[in-house]
């Protein structure tokens, strides 16, 4: 893998531009990333970040409807989409590199000339409500929402990114316009262009297209409130034969010095097909086809969670098996062979990912927006290499304690007592 490189530019209005040339590809990826999402919402407008993201595609001054917006990039074979998270919203497209200017013009048109047509917004709200209902009907997906609600409760970090049926139904066009004007300002946006590009030409095109984004401040969000003194359980009853489980702990935010040790820890536990959880739950119990341990790192929150779906009759066994692995990694040092395997896995996955210009755009833009600092992959690998078995054990001892345990379940259960007795470590 060739050494990655990037250049950062800040326009006069405060807009940050990241240029990441990649001569070995014939493609280009452009990501327009905004520092706003569901954590910036209120109870009244919950889901507005997601609805606004959808609304950009309902029509513009030049492209009157969704079909016209799509046709522009369909006819060049581009892949394009948008997404909303807790702290970020993004619009992106990638295509053959000779269409770079066309993609920039397309994103510029969406941003500067959206129509936000009332009738189309009302229809789109129906689409989003259907999406919410779909997630509610999918326990494998919905368990994540139950998990967040268990940890954070009735505050933005605990709400569904899509909002609720009630909140989405009540959002008006004026609410969308006000939110757009408040959050989509130059200093809250990063544009990253990665691929086979000419740096000077692309930068001039972006300056010409986006220099008029307004300079004003944007609405900040309230910090997440976290307080937990005892193990917590949340069960959502559903008449199904499988139990969907989320069992984990509060951990670190994205700025924490132990984040790389936490990442390695999660992979050892359940991030690979050869991980400990896969063996403990699938091979030994003969259940839990879908099991994984994940970490979430945001600007002021973080957690480690093992998600698993099992036969409802093996729910207690699965919970005990997960806790046994948490306890084991806390009490016994990881072997050097296992540590080396996971470090090599991280490096291999990152190298493969960054072969794609679209992944490079995400890699750079995410760092710039969330941390205002970009660490090249070679330097990240150096940090990974420095993590020791003792570092991992220290993290395990710090996070795997009874008062930090949280258990969420969707399944055919109503009584918490049997599960509560298991939450010991």
Image: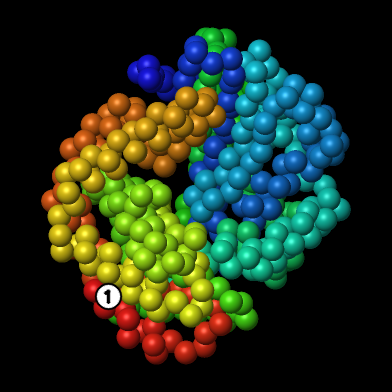
Q: Which is nearer the eye, 69 or 182?
A: 69
Quadrant housing the N terminus: top left
Q: Position of residue 24 (x, y in %)?
A: 50, 13
Rendered residue at 32%/57% (across/down): 276
Q: Position of residue 404 (x, y in %)?
A: 30, 71
Q: How many marks?
A: 1
Left or right of 215: which side holds 278?
left
Left or right of 357: which side holds 372?
left
Q: Is residue 407 above or below residue 353?
A: below
Q: Which is nearer the eye, 291 or 109?
A: 291
Q: Residues within 10 Å of mark 1 (few under 14, many from 20)?
A: some
Q: Is residue 170 above or below residue 419?
A: above
Quadrant housing the C terminus: bottom left
Q: Secondary structure at mark 1?
A: helix
Q: Position of residue 148 (x, y in %)?
A: 47, 66
Q: Is residue 234 above or below residue 359?
A: below
Which residue is identified by label 1? 403
- Quarter of image, res 386: top left
């Amino acid at each position: 893998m060739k050494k990655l490189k990037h250049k950062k530019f800040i326009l006069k209005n405060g807009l940050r531009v990241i240029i990441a040339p990649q001569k070995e590809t014939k493609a280009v990826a452009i990501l327009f990333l905004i520092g706003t999402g569901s954590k910036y919402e209120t109870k009244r407008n919950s889901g507005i970040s997601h609805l606004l993201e959808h609304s950009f595609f309902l029509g513009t001054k030049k492209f009157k409807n969704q079909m016209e917006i799509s046709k522009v990039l369909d006819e060049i074979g581009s892949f394009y989409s948008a997404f909303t998270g807790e702290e970020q919203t993004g619009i992106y497209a990638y295509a053959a590199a000779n269409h770079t200017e066309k993609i920039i013009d397309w994103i510029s048109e969406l941003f500067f000339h959206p129509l936000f047509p009332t009738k189309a917004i009302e229809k789109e709200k129906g689409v989003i409500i259907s999406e919410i209902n779909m997630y509610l009907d999918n326990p494998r997906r919905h368990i994540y929402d139950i998990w967040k609600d268990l940890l954070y409760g009735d505050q933005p970090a605990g709400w569904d990114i899509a909002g609720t049926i009630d909140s989405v139904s009540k959002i008006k066009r004026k609410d969308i316009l006000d939110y757009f004007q408040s959050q989509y300002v130059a200093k809250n946006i990063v544009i990253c262009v990665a691929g086979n590009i000419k740096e000077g030409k692309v930068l001039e095109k972006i300056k010409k297209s986006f220099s008029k984004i307004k300079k004003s401040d944007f609405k900040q969000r309230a910090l997440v409130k976290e307080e937990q003194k005892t193990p917590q359980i949340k069960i959502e009853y559903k008449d199904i034969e499988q139990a969907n489980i989320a069992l984990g702990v509060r951990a670190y935010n994205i700025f924490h010095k132990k984040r790389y040790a936490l990442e390695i820890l999660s992979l050892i536990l359940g991030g690979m097909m050869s991980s400990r959880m896969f063996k403990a739950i699938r091979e030994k119990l003969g259940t839990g086809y879908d099991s994984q341990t994940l970490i979430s790192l945001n600007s002021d929150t973080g957690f480690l969670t093992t998600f698993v779906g099992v036969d409802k009759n093996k729910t207690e066994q699965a919970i005990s098996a997960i806790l046994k692995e948490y306890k084991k990694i806390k009490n016994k040092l990881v072997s050097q062979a296992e540590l080396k395997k996971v470090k090599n896995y991280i490096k291999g996955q990152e190298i493969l990912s960054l072969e794609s210009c679209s992944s490079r755009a995400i890699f750079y833009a995410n760092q710039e927006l969330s941390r205002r600092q970009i660490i090249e992959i070679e330097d990240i690998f150096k940090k990974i290499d420095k993590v020791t078995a003792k570092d991992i054990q220290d993290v395990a001892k710090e996070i795997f304690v009874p008062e930090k345990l949280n258990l969420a379940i969707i399944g055919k259960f109503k009584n918490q007592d049997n599960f509560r007795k298991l939450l010991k470590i």
